[in-house]
Image (tube, rainbow, N blue to C red):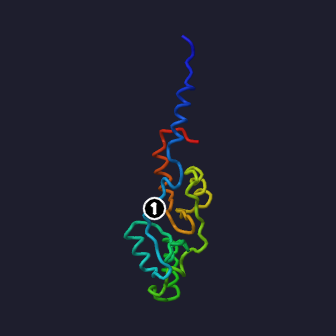
Amino acid sequence: MGIKSFTGARKQQLKEVDHVAVRVSDYMSRDLITFKPEQMVEDVIDKLITNKISGGPVVNDNFELIGIISEGDCLKQISESRYYNMPMEQDKVETRMIKNVETIDGNMNIFDAANKFLESKRRRFPIVVDGKLVGQISQKDILKAALTLKGHNWK
């Protein structure tokens, strides 16, 4: 009996991977909780707690991405309002949000996206198409994708 080659089986496996979804857009969240620039920070804090999220995109009336607000941004507001003895109710999202928002391409491979997360230390990236917010990918979404694909050969 000679040596058996498993190359044929491996080639078949590689062909199957081509059909497996590995793009950011396949795993991104589309049903997002968003915030408006004129919204009060206190309202944001309530929504973050109620929805068990750590932040979210800020959009204008045309659903164009104009910023991101996070728990950390809200904590800064709480800290400063106490330090300067100013009421919290007066602060709006537009004064606390991060305006320079880094986005990610929905066609990016999820493994490249994982590297982008590691390099940037961000928890989420919005996905924008033609200026409009269409979704968001989080570190947790990448982990879910990796579990879904764990039985396949990764490229």
Crowding around mark 1 (Cα neighbors within 10 Å: few <14, some 14 to 19, many 20+) is few
Identify the residue at image location x=45%, y=45%.
Answer: 148
Which residue is labeled 1 in the image?
30
User: Is 42 or 102 nearer to us in this picture?
Assistant: 102
User: Is 84 or 29 nearer to us in this picture?
Assistant: 29
User: Is 10 or 50 nearer to us in this picture?
Assistant: 10
Identify the residue at image location x=50%, y=75%.
Answer: 62
Q: Total of numbered circles in the picture?
A: 1
Q: Is residue 53 left or right of residue 98?
A: left
Identify the residue at image location x=37%, y=70%.
Answer: 50
**SS at mark 1 in the image:** loop
Farthest left residue in view? 50
Is 44 above or below relative to 129? below
Residue 118 position in % (x across, y down): 59, 56
Residue 126 position in % (x across, y down): 53, 64
Residue type at the position of mark 1 = Arg
Q: Quadrant of residue 33?
A: bottom left
Residue 24 position in % (x across, y down): 53, 54
Is 21 above or below relative to 35? above
Residue 66 position in % (x across, y down): 55, 74
Q: Quadrant of residue 106?
A: bottom right
